[in-house]
Every structure is written in C-alpha cells, then in structure tokens.
Amino acid sequence: MSTDPASRSGAVVEIDLAGICANWRQLARRSAPAACAAVVKANAYGLGAAPVSRALAADCRMFFVATLDEGIALREALGTAPEIAVLNGPLPGTAGEFAAQTLIPVLNTPGQIDEWDRDREGPRPGGAILHVDTGMARLGLSAREFAAMLDDPPAIRWRAVMSHLACADTPDHPLNQRQRERFAAIAAQLPGVPASLAASSGIFLAPSYHFDLVRPGAALYGVNPQPGRANPLRQVVRLSAKILQIRQIDRGESVGYGAAHVMAAPGRVAVVPVGYGDGWPRALSQRGCGYLGGARLPLLGRVSMDLVAFDVSAVPEALAHPGAMIELLGPHYGVDEAAADAGTIGYEILCGLGSRYHRVYRDAGEANEPT
C-alpha cells in the first residue's frame, strides 16, 4: 500500500521558493536604497508562511503579518533574528504577548497607542510602528488624531511610521500623489523615524514613493503589480490535478449541476478532484480552463465543491487518461489570468488555495536568478 502523499492526493501545488526569493531581490534592487521587507500574512498569501519566510530570511530581515497569532507562529519558525511586525496591532490585553515574542505592533488607533504606552511590563526592544491614514480610510490615525498625538506625544520608540496606498495599481490615479504628499508631510514631523508607504504596486510608481522601507506582498508571489502591463516578476505557483475519469458525452447531453453546459457535439470530458472546497472559485464556472499537452481545455459547467470537468475532446486519448495531470495554474494560465476569468484579483486566487492539495516546495538554493 502506498504511503506517498503525492500519490494519495488528487491535486498538487508546487511552490517555487527560488522564484519567490528572486522576486524579493528584484524588488529590493528596484527600491534601493530603501530597505525591503516581506509581507507574509494570510499564510504567505496561501503559499505557506513558514517555508516561504525561511527561504526569504537568507536576505530579508523584516517581515509583516496581519495578526498576533500569525506573528507568534512566524517567530517560532524563524527564531529570534528577524524583525516581525503585526499590521492589525494589539487587541486589548495582548501587549504582554507582543513583548514576550519580540513582535513589533503597528499601532493604528489612539486606543492602541495609549495601551501600548501605559503597559510597560517587560522590555520593548523592537519599538512600535505608527500607522497614519492618508486616504485609504481603513486602519490608521486620522490627520486630526495624528495632530493630537504630536501635541501630547507618548513615550514610545517608533521603529517606523507607515501609511498605505489605496490606488497604487492605477498609476494615473490622482489619489496616489495626494497620499504621497500627505505622507511626506507626516514623516517630516517625525524626524529620524524611518518612513514606509509603498507595498507591491507602490514600488513601481516612482522612487519618491519608496521612502525608507517598502513592504511587498503579492508581488513576491507572482501577482502582477502593474495590471495591464507585462508582469516583470517570476510566476511561482503551479497547480495540477489528476484526471479521475474520462467520460464520453453525446451531443445534447448536459454536464454538471444545473445542466449549465450542454454538449454541442459529441466529446470527451475529464473530471478532476478540485472544486470550491479547495478554493477554486465557483465564478470560474463555464469560464475557466486547464491545460494538457499544451492544449487549452475549456472548463465545462459549474465548479462544484470537489470536482471540475474539462473538455479534452481535442487532446489525444494517449494524453488524456485517468491519472494524467491537468494544469490549472502555471505557465499557460497564471494567477492573474485565472483571477480575471473569475472576476477577482490574484490575491484571492492565491489565498484560496486549499488544504487538500499536496504541496511541494522547490528548494530556494536550486535555481539561479532569472535572466
């Protein structure tokens, strides 16, 4: 009886750690002399925070996560050396846990600042990051709250001051410039405190957006930071699924739930074990595709919880057989292409990659820099 997890799994996700590291180095070079961190929240956008961060830690010295639990898990994975910042900041009563794990809180509200300033149990070697809103209207101090803080400054060592761009993936949007100007004025009032504004797409706007620290996330994982232009980054994810069954379907017969697809001609249909239970979006029903032997395979009917059907009529039977692998994400059909067909963004495709996939990590030391 086989004990090989790959043979037991109906679908495999391959993550190219070398590609992720190469993307980080490219972004770091583009941002220099600003320092370059890595955002590994949401389990490194679905790809595995521990293995991804361990690979990046050969060069990267600062990481961002979203929650305290993510920070604790990453500290365990990486040890004591790298800086780890938590974007959502401390919930009430958790300041001690931040200090115990040497995590840097991003302080987003006057309440978080007050609690961090009051709760002084234990050392605070990492300081804290101040988040000021400049146009996102999400987390961060408002302009009025920031002015009030300056009038009565807390006794906090600021590791950095940050904000977040709302429209960085739309280079011509006027809010980008307004946010940059607002942030520059804020940073000027905190002399000596490193400033951080740009995430993935912001890095590609202009050097004036880089300040002292950039925080790429999705771009590390191959999502195009410049929609509508050629993607300068390496694709790092391949998703393949095994054919479970080949069906010969007559003209006029339907495929899947709701009889959503009716065969216009006789054909062969391959069924693979991937569905919305694995994070493969139901919105790809009748719109997505797979690839086998270089041929595009239209997705037929609805994406169900566990299964998807593809038209393999144009593929030789010697290639399309039970056990053969159909590429759902990869060189032919990337994250951004799947996202466009699903009416979403590449971030969501990556973050949705489910736990039933067998995961294979390519060693970051096995590949060279892209040419």
Image (cartoon, rainbow, N blue to C red):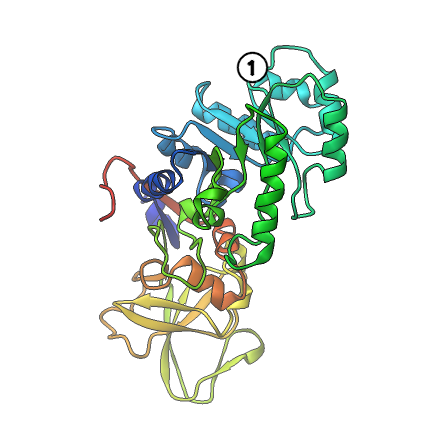
Instruction: Please name the residue shown 76% across and 22% down the image.
Output: 152
Q: Nearer the viewer, residue 176 or 96?
A: 176
Left or right, residue 219 beside residue 16: right
| Image coordinates for residue 42, horizontal then vertical, percent | 54, 41
| Image coordinates for residue 52, horizontal then vertical, percent | 40, 37
Question: What kind of element bears circle 1?
Answer: loop
Left or right, residue 263 beside residue 188: left
Instruction: Please name the residue shown 29% across and 37% down the image.
Output: 364
Instruction: Please name the residue shown 38% across and 45% down the image.
Output: 359
The three-letter code of the residue at mark 1 reads Pro
Specify the quadrant that holds the N terminus: top left
Q: Nearer the viewer, residue 224 or 345?
A: 224
| Image vertical order of residue 305 relative to residue 37, above or below | below
| Image coordinates for residue 343, horizontal then vertical, percent | 54, 66
Left or right, residue 225 beside residue 91: left
Q: Nearer the viewer, residue 70 or 197?
A: 197
Is residue 273 something one can see in this rendering? no
| Image vertical order of residue 181 relative to residue 273, above or below | above
Which residue ends up furthest to the top in the rendered image?
122
Q: Nearer the viewer, residue 6 or 209?
A: 209
| Image vertical order of residue 343 relative to residue 17, above or below | below
Instruction: Please name the residue shown 47% across and 85% down the image.
Output: 253
Is residue 6 something one can see in this rendering? yes
Label 1: how many Cα within 10 Å (few below 14, some 14–19, many 20+) = few
What residue would you read off at disc 1? 125
| Image coordinates for residue 214, horizontal then vertical, percent | 47, 38
Count of marks overlaid on the render: 1
Dividing the picture into quadrants, the one containing residue 325 is bottom left
